[in-house]
Amino acid sequence: MTHTPILRGRLVDVTLVSGQGPINCMLHLCSGSRLPCVAQAEETRATTDLRERRLRTRTGARFLALVVYALALGLWVVAFGVPSDSVQLILWLWLATIAWNIEEPWRHHLAFIQDWWKVGALLIFYFFSRGLADELLRMPVHWMMPIQVDEWMFGGTLPTYWLQEHLCGSPCNPDSPARWYDLAFAATYTTHFVFGLSIAMVLWLRNRVEWKRWMRRYLTLNFAGLIVYILYPMAPPWMASGENRINVEVFRITARGWDEVGLGRLHLILTGVGNPVAAMPSLHAATAFLIAFYAILRLRSIWRWLLIAYPLVMSVGLVYFAEHYVIDIVAGVALAGAVLVVCAQWERGRGS
């Protein structure tokens, strides 16, 4: 890529030449940020390179590699469980990119590690920090606020108790046979560990600039939630019920659907890393709404609005499973919206 600047006062007339031809724009000399025209040219060049790579990978070879990959992943899930920790998932996503571009040289496949190792390191840091969040400042655990707010919003009835009475049984028996919607809610719950990074993998294959934008939002959301977990530890419904803080009994039935089909989730390096009072906000809900909002903002089809069903199903499942109160969901929606706004403003300020 070449460029020819012509000085005109405090502006530069720049012509950038990429695989798609010349791109002309006027840029401020005093800009200390990444230049928007350069970013545009880089995106164009990256798109061209990706198109050429797709042409170099034959359809038959790609199909065969993806079938082998799908069989291997399916056997892994049946034998061990759905990959749920970041390192394990990133490794499986790397194998997916190798299968997609199976005829590329290894130096191309190693570019994934070069781009993703920082993401993996940050997510490992996040998960271990989240597990210790309630020990860092030793803030008091909040029990009654979410109970009182949920009962106020729903006329004196706790939504988790109402859902379990109507969907699980009256009274709810955690050991009773699961219904079809138990499996649907459990599967939706598990997508939290998979969808965010899987979307990132697709964007990495198609558009590296868009991949960076998505990862910026995804990581910001997680670390913003971590800050709240440190400052405001809060007990979820199942824990409050176990401590007799709720005047009705609710049960944690998250595994109810998976147990029925004999599947589960697998953590390799993050086994035992958890924090039961990291409940406000719900990052399961926040991530689901972030995915839906991000897609709705970028897609043009009228059908894109159906994507809002995903976070809504996630939210109902979280309350039904006694993992979260409704106020946790509301806080998650607010966090997702704030992250989208802040990241968009930051990118506009940098001209990216």
Image: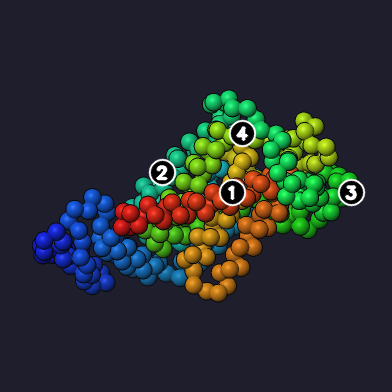
The CA distance from mark 1 to mark 2 is 27 Å
Report which residue position mark 4 lands on: 233
SS at mark 3 in the image: loop
Report which residue position mark 2 lands on: 117
Which quadrant: the C terminus? bottom left
Rate crowding at label 2 as few (under 14), some (14 to 19) or many (20 or more) other CA atoms within 10 Å. few
Q: Is residue 161 left or right of residue 278?
A: right
Asked whether residue 42 appears in the rendered view, the answer is: no
Q: Earlier in the sequence, mark 3 or mark 2?
A: 2
Image location of residue 144, percent across then percent down: 71, 35
Q: Earlier in the sequence, mark 2 or mark 4?
A: 2
The CA distance from mark 3 to mark 4 is 31 Å
Which image quadrant is residue 21 in? bottom left
Image location of residue 211, percent across then percent down: 42, 56
Q: Earlier in the sequence, mark 1 or mark 3?
A: 3
Q: Residue furthest bottom?
A: 302
Q: Earlier in the sequence, mark 3 or mark 4?
A: 3
Select label 1 or label 2 by which is in front: 1
The tag on residue 332 is: 1
Select label 2 or label 4 by which is in front: 4
SS at mark 2 in the image: helix
The tag on residue 75 is: none
Select label 3 or label 2 by which is in front: 3
